[in-house]
Amino acid sequence: MSICSLVVQARPENLSSVSGDLSTMQGVEVHASSEAGKLVVTIDHPQREVCSQTMMDMQNIPGVLSSSLIYEYFEENPNSDQEGD
């Protein structure tokens, strides 16, 4: 299990479209935003690699200036015998 929290800085004029694009990404939830273009975002996914890829994909959304990882929690699935479960 992997849970990441980020602050995404968007151009203020693109805040609505960036928030919408983020919300369509797998495991992504937008929790708060400010008129200055800052968004509080989490990514929740069982596979750590998916979270990493999602963070990189966020950089390609038009209007995103930056994203900063604030917190990450990762725990191996103790019942898993196969990688990726």
Image: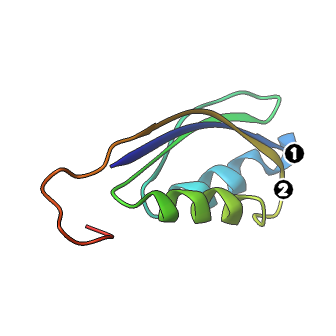
Label 1, on which residue?
Answer: 11
Please give the name of the residue rendered at 81% of the width and 51% of the height, measured from the top-left corner. Answer: 14
Please give the name of the residue rendered at 77% of the width and 59% of the height, measured from the top-left corner. Answer: 59
Q: Examine the image and state in which quarter residue 22 appears.
A: bottom right
Label 2, on which residue?
Answer: 63
Disc tally is 2
Residue type at mark 1? Arg
Coordinates of residue 13 in the picture (x, y in percent): 86, 46
- Local crowd at mark 2 within 10 Å, few (<14), some, or many (≥20)? some
Look at the image and tell me whether residue 25 can be seen.
no
Residue type at mark 2? Gly
Please give the name of the residue rendered at 33% of the width and 43% of the height, measured from the top-left corner. Answer: 75
Residue 58, numbered label: none
- Local crowd at mark 1 within 10 Å, few (<14), some, or many (≥20)? some
Determine the residue located farthest toward the front in the rendered image: 81
Coordinates of residue 78 in the picture (x, y in percent): 18, 50
Compared with 20, 85 (above or below) is below
Q: Along the polypeptide, which appears first: circle 1 or circle 2?
A: 1
Coordinates of residue 58 in the picture (x, y in percent): 69, 59
Position of residue 27 in the picture relative to residue 35 (left or right): left
Please give the name of the residue rendered at 71% of the width and 27% of the height, measured from the top-left corner. Answer: 34
